[in-house]
C-alpha cells in the first residue's frame, strides 16, 4: 500500500480524535485557571466555616494557585507571597503534590496544542489538495468528532455516577508516581480547601460544559453539511 493511500484516512482519524481532546481539555482549563470557580466551590462547601480561613482570605490563595499553574518558573510559596497570602499555607507534601499537578496540567495543555496543530494541518492539507471540496470533508469529521466526544463523556459520566470515589482514586494512582496526594483532611489545607465534594462538582461541571461544546460543534457541522448540500452522511474515511 502506498503512503499516499494512507494519508487521508490518517488525516481523518487525526481530525476526529482531536475534537474530544480539544473540547475536554478546554473545559478542564476553564476551571483550572479560574480562581472564581475555586471561590464558588469553597463557598458552597462552607470552607470558610470548616477552616480558620475566611472566604476573603481564600481569594488571594486561589489567585496564587492559578498563577502557579500559569508560570512554571514560580514556586507555590512565591506565588502565594506575591498575591498577599502567607507563604506557608501549604506544607512540604502539599507543595510537592501541587508541583506534580502543575506538571500534569501543563502536559494536558501540550496534548491539546499538539492535537489542535495536527487537526489544523490536516484541514489545511485537504484544502490545498481539494480546494473548496474540503469544506464537506471537514464538516463531516468535526461532526463525528463531536459524537465521539459525547460518547467519551457518557462513559465517564456513567463511571462517575456508579462510583466516583473509585474513579477519583484510580485517577490519582495512574497520574502520580508517589503518595504525596494522600493528604490528611484534618490538617492539610489543600484537601480542606478543596474537599472531595468540590472535585465531584468540578467533574460534573466539566462534563456539562464539554457536552454543550460538543453539541454546538456537532450542530454547526450538520448545518454546514446541509448548506453544502452533502449532509454528514459521507464516509468518514478517507
Image (spheres, grey):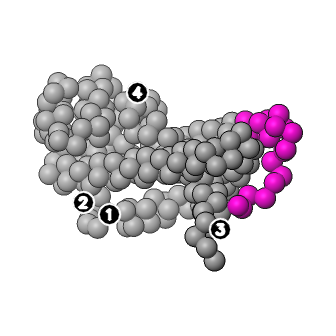
- How many residues crowd mark 3 within 10 Å: few (<14), some (14–19), many (20+)? few
On screen, residue 49 above or below 221:
above
Which callout, 3 or 1, points to the residue nearer the camera? 3
Residue designated by label 1: 176
Q: Are marks 2 and 1 in contact (CB under 8 Å)?
A: yes
- What x and y, as percent, mark residue 53? 26, 31
Q: Are marks 4 and 3 in contact (CB under 8 Å)?
A: no
Identify the residue at horizontal 46%, vertical 36% (top origin). 30
Residue designated by label 3: 5
In the displayed orientation, state which residue is furthest to the bottom.
1
- What x and y, as percent, mark residue 132? 71, 39
Range of residues picked out in magenta: 218-238
- What x and y, as percent, mark residue 51? 29, 36
On screen, residue 13 above or below 58:
below
Residue designated by label 2: 180
Q: Are marks 1 and 4 in contact (CB under 8 Å)?
A: no
Residue designated by label 4: 36
Judged from the image, the secondary structure of the residue bearing numbered disc 2 is loop
Amino acid at each position: 500500500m502506498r503512503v499516499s493511500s494512507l494519508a487521508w484516512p490518517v488525516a481523518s482519524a487525526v481530525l476526529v480524535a482531536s475534537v474530544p481532546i480539544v473540547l475536554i481539555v478546554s473545559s478542564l482549563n476553564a476551571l483550572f485557571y479560574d480562581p472564581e470557580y475555586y471561590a464558588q466551590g469553597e463557598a458552597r462547601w462552607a470552607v470558610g466555616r470548616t477552616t480558620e480561613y475566611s472566604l476573603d482570605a481564600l481569594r488571594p490563595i486561589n489567585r496564587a494557585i492559578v498563577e502557579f499553574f500559569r508560570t512554571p518558573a514560580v514556586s507555590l510559596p512565591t506565588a502565594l507571597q506575591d498575591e498577599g497570602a502567607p507563604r506557608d499555607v501549604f506544607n512540604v507534601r502539599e507543595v510537592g503534590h501541587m508541583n506534580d499537578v502543575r506538571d500534569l496540567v501543563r502536559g494536558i495543555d501540550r496534548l491539546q496544542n499538539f492535537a489542535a496543530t495536527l487537526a489544523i494541518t490536516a484541514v489545511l492539507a485537504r484544502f490545498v489538495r481539494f480546494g473548496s471540496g474540503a469544506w464537506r470533508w471537514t464538516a463531516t469529521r468535526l461532526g463525528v468528532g463531536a459524537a465521539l466526544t459525547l460518547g467519551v463523556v457518557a462513559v465517564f459520566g456513567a463511571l462517575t455516577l456508579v462510583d466516583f470515589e473509585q474513579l477519583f482514586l484510580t485517577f490519582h494512582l495512574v497520574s502520580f508516581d508517589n503518595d504525596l496526594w494522600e493528604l490528611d483532611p484534618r490538617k492539610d489545607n489543600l484537601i480542606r480547601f478543596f474537599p472531595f465534594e468540590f472535585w465531584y462538582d468540578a467533574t460534573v461541571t466539566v462534563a456539562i460544559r464539554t457536552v454543550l461544546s460538543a453539541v454546538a460543534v456537532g450542530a454547526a457541522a450538520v448545518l454546514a453539511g446541509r448548506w453544502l448540500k452533502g449532509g454528514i452522511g459521507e464516509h468518514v474515511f478517507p
